[in-house]
Image: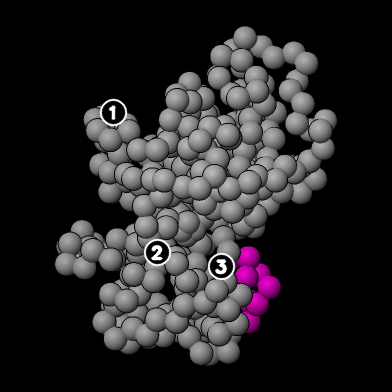
Amino acid sequence: MARVRILLTALSVLPLLALTACGSDSDAAAPKKVSAKTAALGTIDPGVLKVAVQPYAPYTTVKDGKIVGLDGDILSYAAKKLGLTVQPETTDFAGMLAGVQSRRMDITIGGVAWTKDRQKQGLFTDPPYYSPPAMAVGSGKTYKTIDDLKGLRLGTVEGYVWVKSIKAVPGAKLRAYPDANGVFDDLAAGRIDVGFLDPLIIIAAEKERSEQIKTEYLTPPTAAQVKAKPAYEYFRPYQTGFYLPKKATKLEKAISAQIDAMYRNGELSKLVKKWGGDPAQFLKPASDVAPARRGVDRPADWNAPSITSAGQ
């Protein structure tokens, strides 16, 4: 979810990795009766939504043939409204993208970040949420801005986009780890000052280590700061999306419409809170979100969905 799950290299051509089915044969069977409206969505198997996921709690985990987590809950809500049965299959992150781009899968979810390169190979829904720049900090410490990070020991996971951002902070010392546990362990031991990871990962860790770790949100850099240091871009919130094959236009529009409705009816706020997030952080777009997609994969007058516009 860079994750982040923005990779630092373009993934325009990917090897198709094997996908392992989760759930029983009965789970994979299409419903006996599929309405004409549901069939018209054009899924690979009528009435069935084949979903590629990587285990990444609390965003996506497959248990008993169902996707558990924030992304899983959002997609399940939309699928039910559209008369679709969700069929998850597990893979790694590269396999998620490859399965969609080759149309082996109908969709993939799990904090997939919208990028210009990625949208050339597939379709993105409207953002189900925006991933804010979250920090894991030691108990008793407070950091709010990039200036607060100067000269500190900053940790993240190898390959995550924050590696580039951290390197751009004056005097900061980067420590990259193979996984999030290493970040949390060193933070608790005082070997680093701040850890950059996806917000729900930090929030879950805080619940287990409340005396050692707390969650804070970085004030995003200004446009002038990003212009001066482009790597600071990754200290801004990024827009996630559900990712579909390039030809799945009807399905993308239908799921986007359900996502937009969930902003308006309060369902997204409820689900974000369920998984420990703050709707004010997750469901309000930064100023650069809409301009990035206008004229690319959205109309010139497109506005990013927000709970602000919904009056919530």
- Sort mark 3 into few (<14), some (14-19) or many (20+) by Cα contacts within 10 Å: many
Mark 3 → mark 2, Cα distance in angstroms: 16 Å
Q: Mark 3 sits on what residue?
A: 202
Q: Earlier in the sequence, mark 3 or mark 1?
A: 3
Q: Mark 1 sits on what residue?
A: 299
Q: Secondary structure at mark 1?
A: loop
Task: Examine the image and state in which quarter residue 81 appears.
Answer: top right
Q: Nearer the viewer, mark 3 or mark 1?
A: 1
Q: Amino acid at mark 1?
A: Pro
The residue under the point 17% across, 62% down is 227
The residue under the point 51% across, 90% down is 191
Does 234 sit left or right of 108 as displayed?
A: left
Q: Secondary structure at mark 3?
A: helix
Q: Which residues are magenta?
A: 202-214
Q: Mark 2 sits on what residue?
A: 161
Q: Nearer the viewer, residue 298 or 203?
A: 298
What x and y, as percent, mark residue 123? 42, 34
The residue under the point 72% across, 42% down is 21
- Sort mark 2 into few (<14), some (14-19) or many (20+) by Cα contacts within 10 Å: many
Would residue 51 be visible to someone looking at this image? yes
